[in-house]
Image: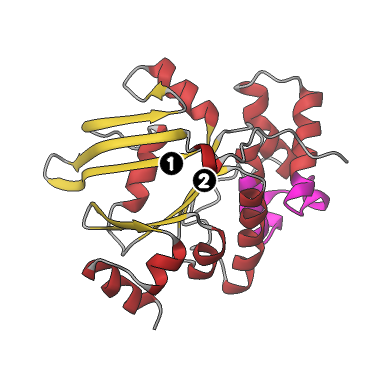
């Protein structure tokens, strides 16, 4: 079975930006300042891992990239589209940005195949045959083709998360966001999900991943970003970040997660 055509770009040297966030600020209830002027540029084909302590704003930050979280100040541009309150722009960005969450968010009353084909049929307006063909290719790619006709409740947590990844890929996004995709999994299931993410990264997909998986960050990331207290504290290559962090806040965080 042939691999589905997922648009990816392996031209990191060109440094063509696909995500540009500038001075993003967000408040909750007008008093909790969760993002304090955060800026980040992600280039096409780049894998960026965002790390930081709980409550640092990292999940909130990447959720602003597809308007799941509104922001009050600054600007965000995704593949040349300015993220604003314009619903057309938001819809256009969401068609190009896939997201995988901590929880799987699968529809329990639909089969695995139906979960994966739902968005392509309704949003991309694909005919059923095309949607199912691509879905089956993706389920094979994430290693669960034999689960296509089962319901989510019949699968392990790791299998459900792989369905969620296939579902996001079915929209053929240009960017994939991962928000702590392994945090709800038992330890033995973490590896199977990270293996899928490694394969996806090696294909040239642009990825922004919030995770505490140090091994994954060391092996796959082009850059590691540390957030703390609503600020972007440091960004560096994995080798630099884990071996020789520059900022005291980074050193404190690493001392907590590496020992």
Q: Badge 1 local density, few (<14 within 10 Å), some, or many (20+)?
A: many
Q: Main secondary structure of the magenta part?
A: helix
Is disc 1 in contact with disc 2, using a CB cutoff of under 8 Å?
yes
Region in magenta = 139-165
Q: Position of residue 128 (x, y in %)?
A: 77, 24
Q: Nearer the viewer, residue 122 or 108?
A: 122
Q: Residue furthest right?
A: 1
| Residue located 51% across and 57% down the image | 221
Q: Residue furthest front?
A: 13
The answer to whether residue 157 of the structure is visible from this angle is: no
At mark 1, the secondary structure is: strand
| Residue located 23% across and 52% down the image | 231
| Residue located 61% across and 50% down the image | 201
| Residue located 33% across and 36% down the image | 21
Q: Position of residue 105 (x, y in %)?
A: 54, 46
At mark 2, the secondary structure is: loop
Q: In this figure, which residue is indicated by the disc labeled 1?
A: 42
Q: Nearer the viewer, residue 42 or 76?
A: 42
Q: Is residue 137 above or below residue 67?
A: below
Q: Which mark is residue 58?
A: none
Q: Position of residue 62 (x, y in %)?
A: 39, 44
> Left or right of 50: which side holds 120?
right
The answer to whether residue 186 of the structure is visible from this angle is: yes
* Colouring style: secondary structure
Q: In this figure, which residue is indicated by the disc labeled 2?
A: 46
């Amino acid at each position: 079975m042939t691999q589905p055509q997922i648009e990816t770009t392996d031209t990191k040297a060109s440094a063509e930006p696909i995500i540009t966030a500038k001075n993003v600020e967000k408040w909750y209830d007008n008093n909790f300042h969760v993002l304090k002027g955060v800026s980040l540029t992600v280039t096409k084909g780049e894998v960026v891992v965002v790390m930081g302590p709980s409550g640092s704003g990292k999940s909130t930050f990447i959720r602003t990239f597809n308007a799941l979280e509104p922001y009050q100040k600054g600007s965000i541009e995704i593949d040349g589209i300015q993220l604003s309150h314009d619903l057309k722009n938001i819809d256009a960005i969401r068609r190009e940005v896939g997201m995988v969450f901590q929880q799987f968010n699968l529809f329990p009353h639909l089969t695995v195949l139906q979960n994966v084909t739902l968005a392509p049929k309704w949003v991309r307006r694909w005919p059923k045959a095309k949607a199912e063909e691509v879905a089956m290719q993706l389920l094979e790619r994430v290693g669960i083709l034999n689960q296509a006709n089962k319901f989510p409740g019949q699968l392990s947590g790791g299998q459900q998360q792989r369905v969620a990844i296939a579902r996001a890929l079915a929209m053929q996004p240009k960017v994939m966001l991962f928000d702590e995709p392994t945090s709800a999994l038992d330890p033995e299931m973490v590896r199977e999900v990270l293996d899928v993410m490694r394969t996806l990264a090696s294909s040239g997909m642009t990825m922004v991943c919030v995770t505490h998986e140090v091994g994954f960050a060391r092996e796959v990331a082009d850059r590691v970003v540390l957030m703390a207290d609503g600020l972007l504290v440091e960004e560096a290559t994995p080798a630099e970040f884990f071996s020789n962090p520059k900022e005291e806040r980074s050193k404190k965080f690493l001392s907590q997660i590496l020992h």
